[in-house]
Amino acid sequence: MRVVCPHCLSINNVPQKDSYKKANCGKCKKSLLDTKPIELNSSNFDEVVVNSDIPVIIDFWAPWCGPCKMMAPNFERAATNFPLKALFAKVNTENEQNLGARFNIRSIPTIIVFKGGREVERVSGTLDVNALGSLAAKYAV
């Protein structure tokens, strides 16, 4: 399966397994098991979403948004349970207004799940860590 490196954004082919003890990027050699959400912008959004065989779960947020700030730690905690099963990412809609408009983001936070390069689910509003985990598990590889 194709997996985008969370560090250098290069595409890696990784065998699909139930769990992984070690998996490093072929280009930058850093761990593909790093689950910290990555920042997406106009220049890398399509490449990451289209080239990832695992679901990409994106939090559309803004720095001035109170509920977004409340949900951010939950989003990071949920991501830790899905190494090489789902890729968690964030889009700052303040800086990336064109992406917010492209995906018709009307309220934030909004979570969109992409699988196979296509949107498969969208949830608006703050989610706790369990709800985020359930959402990710529904589509995880």
Image (cartoon, grey):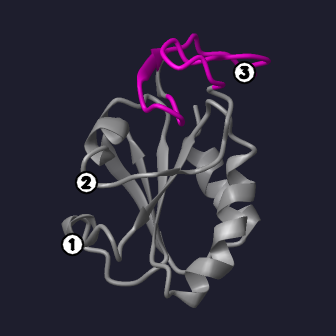
Asked if labels 1 and 3 touch by Cβ distance under 8 angstroms, the answer is no
Which of the marked residues, 1 or 2, is nearer the chain's N terminus? Answer: 2
Give how far apart the Cα atoms at labels 1 and 2 are: 12 Å
Question: For numbered disc 1, what is the local secondary structure?
Answer: helix
Q: Amino acid at mark 3?
A: Asp
Instruction: Please check the rendered image and state whether residue 6 is part of the magenta-colored stretch, yes or no.
Output: yes
| Nearer the observer, 77 or 125 | 77
Asked if labels 2 and 1 touch by Cβ distance under 8 angstroms, the answer is no
Tell me residue 120's x, y (percent).
Answer: 38, 52
Tell me residue 13's x, y (percent).
Answer: 47, 13
Tell me residue 116's x, y (percent).
Answer: 35, 35
For the record, the magenta segment spans 5-31
Q: Residue at x 62, y 26 (%)?
A: 32
Q: Main secondary structure of the magenta part?
A: loop
Residue assigned mark 2: 42
Q: Residue at x 53, y 36 (%)?
A: 6
Which of the marked residues, 2 or 3, is nearer the chain's N terminus? Answer: 3
Residue assigned mark 3: 18
Give how far apart the Cα atoms at labels 3 and 1 are: 37 Å
**Label of residue 101 in the image:** 1
Q: Amino acid at mark 2?
A: Ser
Q: Residue at x 32, y 83 (%)?
A: 106
Foreground mark, 1 or 2? Answer: 2
Which of the marked residues, 3 or 1, is nearer the chain's N terminus? Answer: 3
Give how far apart the Cα atoms at labels 2 and 3 are: 33 Å
